[in-house]
């Protein structure tokens, strides 16, 4: 099974001060134990690195971002022009941020089993996208 994991999950898992840290780490472990391939794209990597570089040292952000994309459980998938064009339309039609539209459209185009995120309010607007919530109680 292949699932996209949104940047917020990786960010939460990397910052001890965030109350979501343990939940995010457990969700990632759950995916790995289910033999899921975790998909990331340039948008997710960019958002993770940017936020970690704001919260940690530049060196620590670099190391942690590389650890994510170098993991044997993570597959980095570049974005194609067709996906980008459809995402621009998705952003307009569903009134969601372009980064979210790029992630959602990429998941749809790759027939991913879903998207693990804590940002359910935007992603549930995307028809056909299975949203996997960080917290089951939501």
Image (tube, rainbow, N blue to C red):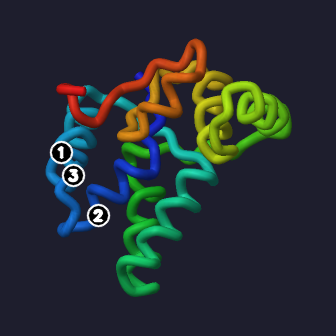
Q: Position of residue 81 (x, y in %)?
A: 84, 39
- 13 to 87, vertically: above or below: below
Asked whether disc 3 touches disc 2, contact meaning CB atoms under 8 Å apart, the reply is: no
Reading the image, the residue beneath label 2 is 14
Position in image of residue 33 (x %, y %): 21, 33
Q: Quadrant of the N terminus?
A: top left
The residue labelled by disc 3 is 20
Between the residue at mark 1 and the residue at mark 2, the CA separation in whole angstroms equals 11 Å
Earlier sequence position, callout 3 versus callout 2: 2
Q: Are marks 1 and 2 in contact (CB under 8 Å)?
A: no
- Give the side of residue 138 with respect to residue 107, left or right: left
Left or right: 117 as drawn, with respect to 24: right
Q: Is residue 113 above or below residue 63?
A: above
- Where does label 1 land, which residue? 23
**Circles 1 and 3: CB atoms closer than 8 Å:** yes
Cα gap from disc 1 to disc 3, whole angstroms: 5 Å
Residue 4 percent coordinates (x, y): 48, 35
Mark 3 or mark 2, which is nearer to you?
A: 3
Counting residues from the start of the chain, the first of labels 1 and 2 encountered is 2
Look at 46% across and 68% down and name the residue there: 51
Q: Looking at the picture, does residue 1 appear above or below residue 65? A: above
Residue at the location (17% across, 43% down)? 26
Q: Residue at x 62, y 25 (%)?
A: 110
Q: CA distance from mark 3 to mark 2?
A: 10 Å
Residue nearest the viewer, comparing 28 with 74: 28
Element type where label 3 sits in the image: loop
Q: Residue at x 37, y 43 (%)?
A: 73
């Amino acid at each position: 099974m292949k699932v996209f994991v949104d940047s917020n999950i990786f960010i939460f898992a990397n910052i001890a001060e965030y109350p979501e840290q343990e939940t995010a780490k457990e969700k990632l472990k759950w995916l790995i134990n289910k033999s899921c391939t975790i998909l990331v794209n340039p948008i997710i990597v960019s958002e993770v690195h940017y936020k970690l570089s704001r919260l940690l040292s530049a060196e620590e952000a670099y190391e942690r971002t590389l650890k994510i994309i170098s993991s044997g459980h993570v597959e980095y998938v570049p974005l194609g022009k067709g996906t980008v064009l459809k995402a621009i339309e998705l952003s307009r039609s569903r009134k969601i941020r372009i980064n979210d539209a790029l992630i959602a459209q990429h998941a749809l185009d790759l027939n991913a089993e879903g998207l693990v995120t804590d940002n359910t309010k935007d992603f549930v607007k995307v028809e056909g996208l299975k949203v996997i919530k960080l917290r089951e109680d939501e």
